[in-house]
Image (cartoon, grey):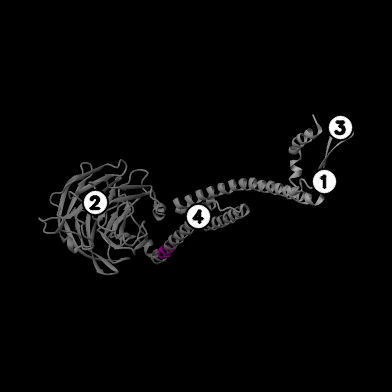
């Protein structure tokens, strides 16, 4: 090959290898002497390239390498932080789950409220919120997961505040009622010592006096609007149920459900072990129901009849008293056409009829057949009576003297068929009441007085 034709060919072969270098040489200088070619003595082609120092930014490349190294180190540090925060986040989420469980326990169990628990919950929630903020700032993130965590923390804080507020209100009501009870207990202490019950003994001439009212507390709904209802104990309890209490209250005369409490403490704590709701077709009316032998007796609405609820099997039964009229009720409350009562002699129901011209009729109930076995006509008009109850086979009727005083003014003895006009006055906690029943197991009167549980000790004349 000739020399003049070989040189261009060699240059073409060298251009790819020289392209990184040529890239730093301005195009206009490529043929201005910066690149030259010659033939050596041995006949080889030699290319000479002149690169000025000012055209290659070596200092910039070095700086770029240092920055890259720093960036790689920073990325590694941030990655390590993320791993650490992921571990912390798992711990925080577990803490949040445990807090949620504790709040749920407090919501479901009011009797487990402790002031210290609420303060500890607040502290832990504040710590958790601070840690979430730290994590968010460290990651410089606006992820929706952080907003979700903040919302959940805020909601839990509101729940804790509401629970504590409810607890304080509940405790305040309880303390007020407890203070009233303590004062009344002090006032009645001397009197109670004089009233010594003789359970099951009817060897007396009747009621001589009642103690001062023992106000237990406001109803389980904590509402004075629940003015209709009743409470008390089983007048002939089954073995093991001697301490059981029952309660049912409503904002209207309609009867819809009943609560059972295993003992006095559970009644105070409003912790029922069973709730019976009347099914369709078994709705009740009026407030004068009673419990005997673990069965609850109440007035069925339609048809007007005696209803019986077995508290063990939750089965229902009813009997119609054809003579009972829905025209006559007590003066304190409408719709009380059938008034159930129980005493040492058995189970009773009082009503008025067209034939009796509105006067009370006493009917003895056969508990086995759930039918009426005997009846007595009294001479007292039902609409003039505040309420009535049975004790040792004697019906006692009450009426109002004034807003603070009630009076037992009439008695009818089913054994002798004799009636008496009495004047046994006793104090009332509130003006009107819808339920008054005697219990032979403790010789007490149980009154449901405008939403409050009230009781009286009964003193009999043993002369």
- Decide whether residue 148 is among the magenta residues: no
Q: Observer-nearest residue: 449 or 255?
A: 255
Please, which residue is most extreme toward the left here?
355
- Identify the residue under disc 3: 43
Dot 3 falls on a residue whose secondary structure is loop
Q: Observer-nearest residue: 50 or 104?
A: 50
Asked whether the beta carbons under mark 1 and mark 4 sit within 8 Å of each other, the answer is no
Dot 1 falls on a residue whose secondary structure is loop
Mark sitting earlier along the chain (1/3): 3
> Which numbered mark, 3 or 4, is in the foreground of this view?
3
In which quadrant will I find the C terminus? bottom left
Label 1 – label 3 distance at C-alpha: 22 Å
> Which numbered mark, 2 or 1, is in the foreground of this view?
1
- Count of number-bearing discs: 4
- Identify the residue under disc 1: 50
Mark sitting earlier along the chain (1/4): 1
Q: Is residue 5 above or below residue 157?
A: above
Q: Residues within 10 Å of mark 1 (few under 14, many from 20)?
A: few
Label 3 – label 4 distance at C-alpha: 85 Å
Label 3 – label 2 distance at C-alpha: 127 Å
- Decide whether residue 179 is among the magenta residues: yes
Mark sitting earlier along the chain (3/4): 3
- Identify the residue under disc 4: 151
């Amino acid at each position: 090959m000739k020399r003049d034709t070989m040189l261009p060919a060699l240059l073409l072969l060298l251009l790819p290898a020289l392209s990184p270098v040529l890239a730093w040489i301005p195009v206009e200088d490529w043929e201005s002497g910066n690149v030259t070619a010659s033939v050596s003595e041995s006949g080889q082609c030699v290319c000479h390239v002149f690169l000025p120092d000012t055209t290659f930014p070596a200092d910039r490349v070095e700086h770029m390498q240092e920055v890259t190294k720093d960036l790689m180190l920073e990325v590694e540090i941030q990655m390590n932080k993320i791993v650490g925060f992921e571990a912390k986040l798992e711990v925080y989420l577990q803490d949040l789950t445990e807090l949620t469980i504790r709040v749920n326990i407090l919501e479901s169990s009011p009797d487990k409220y402790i002031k210290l628990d609420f303060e500890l919950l607040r502290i832990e929630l504040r710590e958790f919120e601070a840690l979430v903020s730290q994590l968010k700032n460290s990651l410089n993130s606006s992820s929706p997961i952080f907003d979700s965590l903040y919302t959940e923390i805020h909601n839990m804080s509101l729940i804790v505040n509401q629970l504590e507020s409810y607890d304080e209100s509940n405790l305040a009501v309880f303390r007020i009622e407890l203070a009233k009870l303590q004062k009344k207990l002090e006032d009645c202490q001397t009197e109670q010592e004089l009233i010594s019950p003789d359970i099951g003994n009817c060897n007396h001439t009747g009621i001589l006096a009642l103690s001062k009212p023992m106000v237990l507390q406001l109803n389980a709904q904590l509402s004075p609007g629940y003015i209709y209802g009743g409470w008390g104990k089983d007048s002939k309890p089954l073995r093991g149920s001697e301490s059981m209490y029952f309660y049912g209250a409503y904002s209207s005369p309609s009867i819809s459900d009943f609560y059972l409490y295993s003992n006095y403490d559970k009644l105070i704590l409003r912790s029922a072990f069973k709730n019976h709701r009347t099914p369709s077709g078994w709705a009740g009316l009026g407030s004068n129901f009673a419990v005997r032998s673990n069965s609850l007796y109440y007035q069925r609405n339609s048809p007007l009849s005696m209803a019986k609820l077995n508290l063990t099997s939750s089965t229902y039964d009813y009997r119609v008293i054809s003579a009972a009229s829905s025209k006559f009720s007590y003066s304190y409350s409408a719709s009380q056409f059938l008034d159930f009562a129980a005493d040492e002699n058995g189970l009773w129901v009082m009503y008025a009829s067209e034939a009796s011209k509105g006067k009370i009729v006493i009917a003895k109930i056969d508990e086995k057949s759930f039918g009426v076995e005997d009846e007595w006509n009294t001479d007292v008009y039902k609409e003039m009576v505040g309420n009535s109850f049975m004790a040792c086979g004697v019906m006692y009727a009450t009426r109002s003297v004034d807003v603070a005083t009630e009076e037992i003014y009439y008695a009818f003895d089913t054994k002798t068929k004799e009636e008496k006009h009495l004047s046994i006055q006793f104090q009332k906690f509130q003006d009107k009441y819808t339920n008054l029943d005697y219990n032979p197991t403790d010789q007490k009167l149980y009154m449901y007085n405008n939403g409050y549980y009230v009781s009286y000790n009964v003193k009999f004349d043993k002369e």
